[in-house]
Image (tube, rainbow, N blue to C red):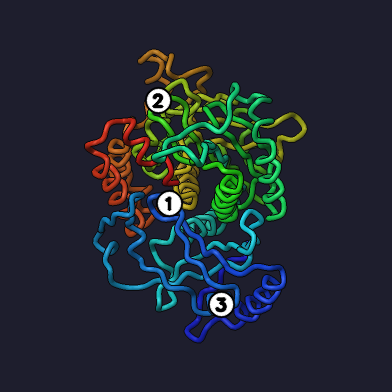
Amino acid sequence: MTTLADPLPGGRPGEVERATALAAELTGRGVHGIVLAYVDTAGVGRVKTVPTAKLASAAAWGVGMSPVFDTFLANDSIVTTDVLGSPDGDLRLYPDLDHLAILSGQPGWAWAPVDRITQEGERHPGCSRTFLRRTVVDAQRLHGLTFRAGIEIEWALGLATAPDDAFVPATSGPAYSATRQIELGDYGAELLSALAAQGVDVDQFHPEYAAGQFELSIGALDPVAAADRSVLVRQTIRAVAQRHGLRASFAPAVFAQGVGNGGHIHLSAWRESANLHAGGDRRYGMTADAESFAAGILAHLPALTAVTAPSPASYFRLQPSQWAGVFTAWGRETREAAVRVVTGTAGQRAQAANLEVKPVDLAANPYLALGSLIAAGLDGLTSSAALPEETTGDPAHLGAAEAETRGVRRLPTSLAESVAEFRKDTQLRAALGPVLADAVIAVREGEIAAVAELDDEQVAAVYRWKY
């Protein structure tokens, strides 16, 4: 992937020339404004926009945005750390022109992810996109590894006319049913058309298990592009839904009871164009490095949930026997295990084999989630961590002795427990760096305090339309 060059004090002439030409082309195609998008620590997508004519200026000098957004909560309250949360200072949002897309679901608009840079031209230590890129670059430099990643997107469609922010499912019929597909066939067709026009490679689109729920599986990309793609796809899903009188919720739990919306991450490590999860001499074709990478993720999972399941509502979804992966277990094609080893169909395994990490939802900042998972896996690879015995079936049915033998433990059952695990995990916090790690803790503790007096259904309602 071509990365954003560091901005120079006198502007960025190469990017300015490119942006000037691009702005002229976009104007000719009826694009009037550019959405500059990033995701904050709380997992909320934040944006600024500029007229298309100002794209060159944005490429040269960035667009101002306060660093206070690093410590915004989902309800727009602000918490603080030693260095974040103050009204002082400014950052610049620099669009990545390599990933700019015309928004087919929002005529007249284009979209671009941004890197956040200080006014002095330095990378902002709280920029999650920078963190992910740094993690990927270090993996290649130190271990010769590259990665392919994909983020599944589940959402619930409700009627936009429902009163008082209530959720009224926009479909009827059973899970995965033809009834649901037919009822929202026009919506689905427009969504697929918009995504294709934006260059998004969709593998699958189908009605899911919960009421009004649908899922998209997106083709694998390098991790930074995969995180960008997740943000772009959700922007498109929301826009097309609105055009059809619908409202899309990516919240982990629309209601406190029942199956929620996941954001499972598929991840594979590669070296010299070879997939480490296929063709090896370890279990299910994994190489020794692939097993250690998986073992690292498993070992850090309790702390990782503070990043991958960051909302108080996340823990309504993370329930046993609901395919959410709430135990530190792995298994081949075992959908109740937190880490599912996907071997792929015979004949495709060299390309398709990967790890699916299941205790992830779309309240997670995708850059933080992917970067943290890779950092955890690399820790396992560096230490040659041993992958424990495989678990088959539902880990919830294991007896205490067998679970202990296999190293299977229940993941945190609340955000408070996740934060406690994150505080103890010095390696994971070091990978994020002190600024980001402290922001994660402060924002999570702020979310806990914000809903401390609410019952479960009230908590679900508070976060229903935030993500």
Disc 3 element: helix
Q: Is residue 273 left or right of residue 154?
A: right
112 left or right, relative to 446: right
Find disc 1 in the rendering and name its residue: 44
Residue reaching furthest to the bottom: 10
Q: In the rendered image of this protein, does residue 16 appear above or below residue 109?
A: below
Quarter where residue 52 is shown: bottom right
Identified at 60% across, 26% down, the residue is 333
Expressed as whole percent of the image width and height from the top left, the position of residue 402 reads 41, 15
For the residue pair 439 and 50, the one nearer the viewer reads as 50
* Pointer 2 local density, CA inside 10 Å: few below 14, some 14–19, many at least 20: few
Task: Name the residue rendered at 63%, 64% in the picture.
Answer: 108
Task: Measuring from the top left, give residue 6's x and y in whole percent.
Answer: 51, 74
Q: Indicate the secondary structure of the residue bearing disc 2.
A: loop
Q: Which image quarter holds the N terminus?
A: bottom right
Residue located 71% across and 38% down the image: 350
**Mark 2 residue type:** Gln
Q: Which residue is mark 2?
A: 257
Does 390 sit left or right of 351 as displayed?
left
Give the residue drawn at x 47%, y 27%.
259
Q: Secondary structure at mark 1?
A: loop
Q: Which residue is mark 3?
A: 54
The answer to whether residue 90 is visible is yes
Q: Position of residue 262 (x, y in %)?
A: 50, 36
CB atoms of marks 1 and 3 within 8 Å: no
